Amino acid sequence: MNKIKTYIKNNLLTFTGFVIGAFLGWLYWFYIGCSSGTCPISSTWLGTSLFGGLIGALLLSSIKIKKKQ
């Protein structure tokens, strides 16, 4: 259990980026989306949310925080 807490604490920005990105992806699907249903990513809410979560996680995981020693 302690290893899980440490892993989550070390990767908190990545998880936060995924959640924010997934929410923004869902908002994109809800307001803009794909009316014809032929768009591979934005035709369903799940695809758009997962894609947004992936992009958000990648963006925030690239930020490095220096820890005090």
Image (cartoon, helix red, strand yellow):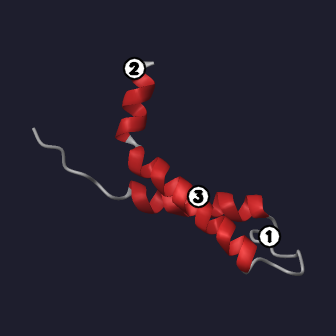
Regarding mark 1 in the picture, which secondary structure is present there? loop
N-term mark: 1 or 3: 1
Pointer 2 residue:
2
* Residue at the far left in the pictured view: 69
Pointer 1 residue:
40
Regarding mark 3 in the picture, which secondary structure is present there? helix
| The C terminus sits in image quarter | top left
The residues tagged by marks 2 and 3 sit, at their Cα atoms, a distance apart of: 26 Å
Residue 40 sits in quarter: bottom right
Q: Residue 45 appears at what percent x and percent y? A: 76, 63
Instruction: Residue type at mark 3: give it.
Output: Gly
Q: Residue at x 19, y 49 (%)?
A: 66
N-term mark: 2 or 3: 2
Pointer 3 residue:
53
Q: Residue at x 40, y 43 (%)?
A: 11
Regarding mark 2 in the picture, which secondary structure is present there? helix
Q: Residue at x 55, y 62 (%)?
A: 21
Q: Residue 33 appears at what percent x and percent y? A: 76, 77
Tell whether label 3 touches label 2 (CB within 8 Å).
Answer: no
